């Protein structure tokens, strides 16, 4: 199986920079996903234009004392943390203390961030007694990376416990898949009154969790007492993920419902599962038998979602624009509530995760 991986991800990265030359207008988690993808491309290619794109997008928002324009700690939203994941490399490359200070600014949110009774951060402060698995990527992954970069063992251990809690509540022990939400009071309209769980296996929520899990595993020292438990969760999850992989190589919006009417193949979740498989194999958290699935997935990403226009620019279609539980009356966790969500082209959540996936495939092939 062969395809022009390097040309495709380079062309998408370059086309994205041309389409969105300035991502400095707001502190935004979706921008953060694209910048994370660019960071991976920069690390692989060592091309300065990708690093400069990240720096030019972040620097205008960071003051010399580490304050972040547009960031409000007291809003206590995990989404506001995600973009901070690119601060570590900015600091390591430039040695400019303002990036380190900004990372500490984000870290300080977790000192007072509201939690569930069992210790997981709320996705937003108004979402009491609820965990969403996407929070593990949006907030906890940064928290763990901070722990590794700045030798903050408390942050690292706390992050690990939150990953495990999410699996303990949300993971189906037979399939390995996780539903998006758990409500410990069982009072939310989307929550099962007996279990407190939401109903469906939403691709992107599951994708965020899988990416965060393999990244946090990479941050952990090999002698960490709970490392084996995280590996167990990851292996169970990825076994379940490949079992619902479509014959096209990619995954559905509701991953276990295949050809059910109204469902559709979705780009961001498919990119995240590709990333998680390839990185998991490369770091030996998964055995080599998964490589065929990873390569098939990347081939599927290109065939299903990549579009080249008449000017030769590369676009990514098929990314779910938005989705979730609550907030809107129809978001009750049913198949229909996820399958009705519209898709968009060149959505940052899809573009960033595609770049991340492509880089991992490139590294795996090397």
Image (tube, rainbow, N blue to C red):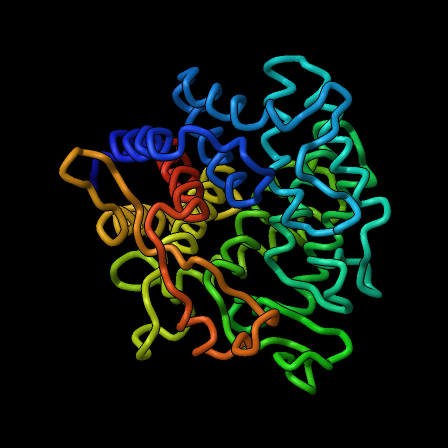
Q: Where is residue 95 drawn, in percent x and y? A: 67, 13
Q: Position of residue 148 (x, y in %)?
A: 71, 32
Relative to 64, 21 lies left or right: left
Q: Residue at x 73, y 18 (%)?
A: 64
Residue at point 74% right, 35% down?
Answer: 147
Q: Nearer the viewer, residue 275 or 77?
A: 77
The residue depicted at 75 percent of the width and 64 percent of the height is 126
**From the viewer's perspective, is 99 left or right of 276?**
right
Residue 161, given in percent of the width and then of the height, sits at 75, 53
Q: Based on the displayed image, in which of its 4 quarters is residue 97 positioned?
A: top right
Quadrant of the drawing holding the N terminus: top left
Q: Is residue 214 above or below residue 128?
A: above
Which residue reaches farthest bottom?
193
Q: Quadrant of the C terminus?
A: top left
Figure check: 54 above or below 36 = above
347 to the left or right of 99: left
Residue ID at (64%, 76%): 197
Kindly indicate the quadrant of the structure image that contains residue 88.
Answer: top right
Q: Is residue 188 above or below residue 251?
A: below
Total numbered circles: 0
Outermost residue on the left side: it is 310
Q: In this rendered view, identify the residue nearer to me: 286 or 304.
A: 304
Image spot of residue 52 (x, y percent): 48, 19
Q: Answer with the quarter of the image where residue 260 lies.
A: bottom left
Q: Residue furthest top?
A: 95
48 or 252, nearer to the observer: 48
């Amino acid at each position: 199986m062969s395809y022009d991986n390097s040309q495709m991800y380079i062309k998408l990265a370059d086309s994205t920079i041309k389409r969105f030359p300035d991502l400095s207008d707001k502190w935004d988690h979706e921008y953060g996903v694209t910048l994370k993808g660019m960071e991976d491309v920069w690390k692989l290619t060592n091309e300065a234009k990708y690093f400069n794109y990240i720096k030019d997008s972040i620097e205008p928002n960071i003051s010399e004392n580490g304050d972040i324009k547009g960031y409000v700690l007291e809003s206590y939203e995990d989404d506001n943390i995600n973009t901070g994941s690119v601060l570590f490399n900015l600091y390591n490359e430039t040695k400019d203390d303002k990036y380190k200070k900004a990372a500490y600014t984000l870290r300080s949110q977790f000192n007072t961030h509201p939690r569930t009774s069992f210790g997981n951060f709320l996705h937003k402060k108004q979402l009491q007694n609820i965990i969403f698995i996407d929070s593990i990527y949006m907030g906890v992954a940064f928290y763990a990376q901070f722990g590794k970069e700045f030798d903050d063992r408390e942050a690292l251990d706390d992050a690990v416990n939150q990953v495990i809690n999410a699996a303990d509540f949300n993971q189906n022990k037979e399939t390995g898949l996780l539903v998006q939400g758990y409500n410990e009071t069982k009072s939310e309209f989307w929550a099962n009154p007996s279990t407190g769980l939401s109903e469906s296996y939403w691709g992107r929520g599951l994708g965020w969790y899988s990416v965060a899990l393999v990244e946090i595993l990479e941050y952990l020292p090999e002698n960490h007492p709970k490392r084996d438990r995280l590996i167990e969760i990851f292996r169970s999850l990825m076994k379940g993920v490949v079992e619902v992989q479509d014959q096209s190589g990619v995954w559905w919006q509701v991953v276990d419902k295949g050809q059910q009417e109204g469902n559709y193949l979705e780009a961001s979740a498919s990119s995240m599962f590709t990333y998680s498989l390839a990185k998991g194999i490369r770091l030996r958290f998964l055995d080599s038998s998964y490589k065929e699935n990873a390569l098939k997935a990347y081939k599927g990403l290109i065939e299903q979602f990549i579009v080249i226009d008449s000017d030769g620019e590369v676009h990514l279609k098929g990314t779910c624009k938005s989705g979730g539980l609550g907030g809107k009356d129809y978001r009750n966790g049913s198949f229909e509530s996820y399958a009705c969500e519209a898709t968009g082209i060149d959505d940052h959540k899809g573009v960033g995760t595609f770049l991340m996936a492509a880089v991992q495939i490139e590294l795996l092939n090397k």
